[in-house]
Image (cartoon, rainbow, N blue to C red):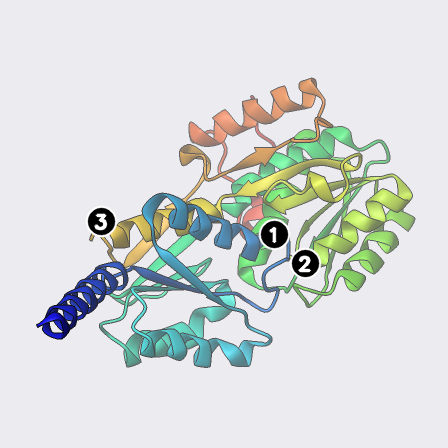
Amino acid sequence: MRKKVLSLTFVAILVLSLAVGCTTGGDSEIVVGMITDTGGLGDQSFNDSAWAGLEKAKKELKIAPKVLESQSADDYGPNLTSFAEEKADLIIGVGFLFEESMKAAAEQFPEQKFAVVDTVIDAPNVASLTFAANQGSYLVGVAAGLATETNKIGFIGGMQYPTIQEFEFGFRAGVKAVNPDAEVFVQYADSFEDAGKGKEIALAQHNKGADVIYHAAGGVGVGLMQAAEEKGFWAIGVDRDQSELAPKNVLCSMIKRVDAATYSISKDIVDGKFEGGLKKYDVTDGAIGYSDNAGNLPEDIKAVMEEHKQAIIDGKIVVPNTEEEFNAFQIPQL
């Protein structure tokens, strides 16, 4: 009889433990898979910002974020397929270079929900998260135009694609708006991760007289920060506040809240409100702007930047995206 009681007790404990295990593991955890571009995590820019949004969503929304880092563009398709076959609730591709591979994946997995940053894909199961980076670049262009003492300014781009050229022409328009006599040197690194190339370009521009240099080049910009710290000129960060890279030499940073976008689209999944289509972020919603965590930006320059920011919000300034629009850009009368 004692054996029977013990056996029944053991069975009861086993059933209870299995029930608890099913409750813990079977809460239909929401999985959000993020795929980096070739810059990867640790770029202290674009990819890190996107991941920060998912880390926040993990804490506040209890999602389970996963990441696959792409070593080359050839990894984009296989990484998308990998998450789709795992049946992740949402798959996010970080960067405009995902365009072709995500188009194919969205067609191959029509029930899978996707989001892509910085490009537009016309598919019902893809949310296209885009940013008016030209507006934020314009504002830091205003800062550069007012801060330069040599009237020579630099811009370093990653790859010469339309998405990155939006940064360039917005920045050049901001410089032109407050300092039309300033010369802006422009060079593209053909990379988003080669910090050595970024440093080489920055030093070359500085040797030509540039005392303020802005980048839109992901990890390449780390080299700009190193050069600025060594030579004592101003650098302008991008995507997130980058003043920690060179606290005495980062004038300000153009803020592009990729983290806000990845958090927001994750919340849509959690709330059952996901919709494909275009989602545009700009200065009006605070997703685009600038920061000065190191305190290097003079108050008088900030005041002018704020004036121009309000003019953009009010529609008095339309910031160019392309070379044609830049050439037609007129200095605003504020």
Task: State the image coordinates of residue 208 (x, y, percent, origin top left).
Answer: 89, 49
Q: Secondary structure at mark 3?
A: loop
Q: Which residue is mark 1?
A: 45
Task: State the image coordinates of residue 44 (x, y, percent, origin top left).
Answer: 64, 52
Alpha carbon distance from label 3 to label 1: 28 Å
Q: Quadrant of residue 196?
A: bottom right
Alpha carbon distance from label 3 to label 2: 34 Å
Identify the amino acid type marked 2: Gly
Alpha carbon distance from label 1 to label 2: 7 Å
Q: Nearer the viewer, residue 242 or 199?
A: 242
Task: State the image coordinates of residue 248 (x, y, percent, origin top left).
Answer: 80, 34
Identify the amino acid type marked 1: Ser
**Label 1–label 2 contact, CB within 8 A:** yes
The label on residue 264 is none
Residue at image coords 70%, 27%:
297
- In screen coordinates, is 53 left or right of 241? left
Identify the amino acid type marked 3: Asp
Q: Which residue is mark 3?
A: 271
Q: Secondary structure at mark 2?
A: loop
- In screen coordinates, is 60 left or right of 243? left
Q: In what quadrant of the picture does the N terminus appear? A: bottom left
Q: Which residue is mark 2?
A: 219
**Is residue 123 something that shows in the picture?**
yes
Disc 3 or 1, which lies upstream in sequence? 1
Q: Residue furthest front?
A: 1
